[in-house]
Image: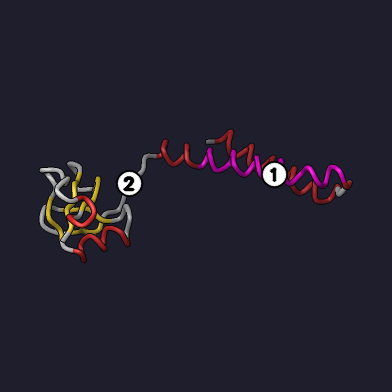
Amino acid sequence: MKYAEFNKDGLPLGFYSLDVNGSNIPKGAIKINDDQWQEFIDNNGLRKWNGEKVVHYKPVFSKKYLKDIRAEEIKLELNEIDKKSLRPLRTGDNDFLSKLEKQAENLRKELSNL
C-alpha cells in the first residue's frame, strides 16, 4: 500500500509509504495500491489520477515552451561544435573544420528563426 498526493489536475506531486515515511504521510494523501504506484513510476509524466484510478495523460506544451527547449538544444549543439573545432584548428584539418562551420551556420540560422 502506498499513498500519493496529486495536484488539481491529478498529476502526482509525491508518493509515500509507511515503510519509508512512517506516520509522516500528509493528511490529504490518497491510498493507492502498489500496482497503481508502479504505473506512475513506469510512465513518469504520462499518467494521472482521475479521482478513482490511474489514467493515461498526454502533456500539451505551448509553442513558446517548445521553441525555448529547441533554442537550448541548439545552444548546447553549438557549444559542442566549438569544442570539436579546437583539434581541427590545431591540426589543420580544414575539411572537418568546414563541415563543423556549416553545421554551426545552419544551427544559428535555425536559432534566429525561432
The image quadrant that residue 34 belongs to is: bottom left
Amino acid type indicated by mark 2: Val
Answer above or below: position of 82 versus 55: above
Of the image marks 2 and 1, the number of the one nearer the N terminus: 2
95 vs 37, nearest the viewer = 37
User: Where does the image place residue 90, in percent across and percent down from the top left?
Assistant: 86, 43
Q: Quadrant of the N terminus?
A: bottom left
Amino acid type indicated by mark 1: Ile
User: Where does the image place residue 12, in percent across and percent down from the top left?
Assistant: 24, 49
64 vs 55, left or right, is right
Q: Residue furthest right?
A: 92
Answer above or below: position of 20 versus 77: below
Give the crowd class for mark 1: few <14, some 14-19, many >=20 residues within 10 Å: some
**What's the residue at 31%, 49% (across, down)?**
59
**What's the residue at 59%, 42% (across, down)?**
76
Q: Which residues are magenta?
A: 70-90
Q: CA distance from mark 2 to mark 1?
A: 32 Å
Q: Residue furthest top?
A: 112
- Let me know if residue 40 is in the magenta part: no
Majority secondary structure of magenta residues: helix
96 vs 108, nearest the viewer = 96
- Let me know if residue 82 is in the magenta part: yes
The figure's colour scheme reads secondary structure
Q: Which residue is mark 2?
A: 60
38 vs 24, left or right, is right
**Judging from the image, what secondary structure is the residue with disc 2 in?**
loop
The image quadrant that residue 66 belongs to is: top left
The image quadrant that residue 53 belongs to is: bottom left
Q: Are marks 2 and 1 in contact (CB under 8 Å)?
A: no
User: Where does the image place residue 43, in percent across and percent down from the top left?
Assistant: 32, 59
Q: Which residue is mark 1?
A: 81
